[in-house]
Amino acid sequence: MNKARGEPGLQERPHPHIVKEFKRHCGVDLTKDAMALQRVREAAEKAKCELSSSLQTDINLHYILNNIQVVLNMRKLITGIPSNSHFDQHILQHIVKEFKRECGVDLTKDAMALQRVREAAEKAKCELSSSLQTDINLPYLTMDASGPRHLNMKLSRSQLEGIVADLIRRTVAPCQKAMKDADLSKGDIQEVLLVGGMTRMPKVQQMVQELFGRAPSKSVNPDEAVASGAAIQGGVLAGNVTDVLLLDVTPLSLGIVTNGGIFTRLINRNTTIPTKHSQIFSTAADGQSQVDIKVFQGEREMAADNKLLGQFTLVGIPPAPRGVPQIAITLDIDASGIVHVSARDQGTGREQQIVIQSSGGLSKDDIENMIRSAERHAEADRTKKERTEAVNMAEGVAHNVEAKMEEFKDHVPAEERAKLEGDIANVRGLLANKDEDVNAIKQAGSDLQQSSLKLFELAYKKMASDRENSGSTSEGETRKARQ
């Protein structure tokens, strides 16, 4: 089964794509068989590794169903960030297209001829990094009815730059994103290192200079950079290298779900690990004796849109009004990427915890998809979060005002009490309407808070005055008794 580049499905994670194609061809749903699904994951991982050095790979799946063996062979191309092979493929397609236009022969139907063209394309690409033009000569490339066909064409550097222009443009966005994530501007970049053989291409170096405002450094051999980094990392892990510190970062934000389904971040994306962060939370209802701690990973504003990593329950919280219990939530990521989550009630000392393995099972493609999804839905998520926060604020104000009215009931005039009760009813009415404008909810909550503050300030002063007068009276009576 062949798929060309750019067709739907190639940007999906590999193993869901394989599962979908297997079901389409064989009528078998592999998601219901854990053992089969594991084999698919292993095959997908192997295919991704092979595709890092070749343009295509075969995925062979054997599946036993009611004593019948089902076999599916899938040949799949996966595209991602441009690599050397992508550039070679673009040049290959250009040569094949030109040969067909001049000779009327389709080289894609001749595997041996296509391999010779692929090798010539790679050689031409390398030569054009140091020269302005190169000749591609392949005698006796193929045969047709008229006899042998030879390939003889010239390829200039400007032609090559036009052929691969889309690949070069695709490298710009990841660079811009890296600067944004690091909160750096072009002026903050001190040095740009180029990695990979394609960075020798003058057009790539020109793009780097335009993007970062400085010429790239040539102090590192681009062909050896990755291998050198891997060797250094191996030395660090083995304890043989002690003067170099390689730091990893969290690929996505980590946090918990709070009232209203909001994703509250405790550790932001791209935070250097190991790291540890704690924050105090409280209960959302009166008399709440337990809280559910759900840990999520992602970049969306609402927890339901992110990936749930784990959950646990902290029990034994003494019944108290909402907002009174103090619960410390701590997220601790060690150097291996393992997340330790704990919840501790500050009043009783009760504690529960959970350990989440590295990255929560997310692949690099999963992480990129989640980041892109957060960017696509940023405005909608912001609106949803803003509304939820406004509802939580208004509900909290209404609850607090009711509690204070009960506390100061002997010091609040009946008319003012009735007015506040009317304001509370108005807020609750707005909250009951799911389509109510968020600004109206904010305004109603703010108005209720301001009016209650003024009233309770007067009530507090009146209560203090009554106590002072009561104390003076008691002191005078005591003096009379002594006389």
Image (cartoon, helix red, strand yellow):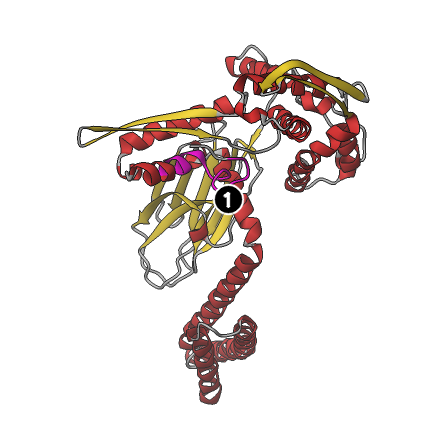
Residue at which label 1 appears: 370
Q: Name the image quarter holding residue 24.
A: top left
Name the amino acid type tagged 1.
Answer: Met
Relative horizontal placement of residue 286, taking residue 359 as reference (left or right): left
Considering the whole magenta stretch, tell me its main secondary structure: loop
Where residue 111 sits: x, y (%)? 53, 20
Question: In percent of the image, x 26 and y 35: which residue is there?
Answer: 33
Which image quarter is the C terminus in? bottom left
Can see residue 67? yes
Relative horizontal placement of residue 460, taking residue 285 as reference (left or right): right
Q: Nearer the viewer, residue 108 or 181?
A: 108
Looking at the rendering, the stretch of residues picked out in magenta corresponds to 4-19
Q: Is residue 56 magenta?
A: no
Name, please, the residue furthest toward the top: 240
Q: Nearer the viewer, residue 404 or 80?
A: 80
Question: In percent of the image, x 51 and y 62: which residue is there?
Answer: 384
Relative horizontal placement of residue 87, taking residue 317 as reference (left or right): right
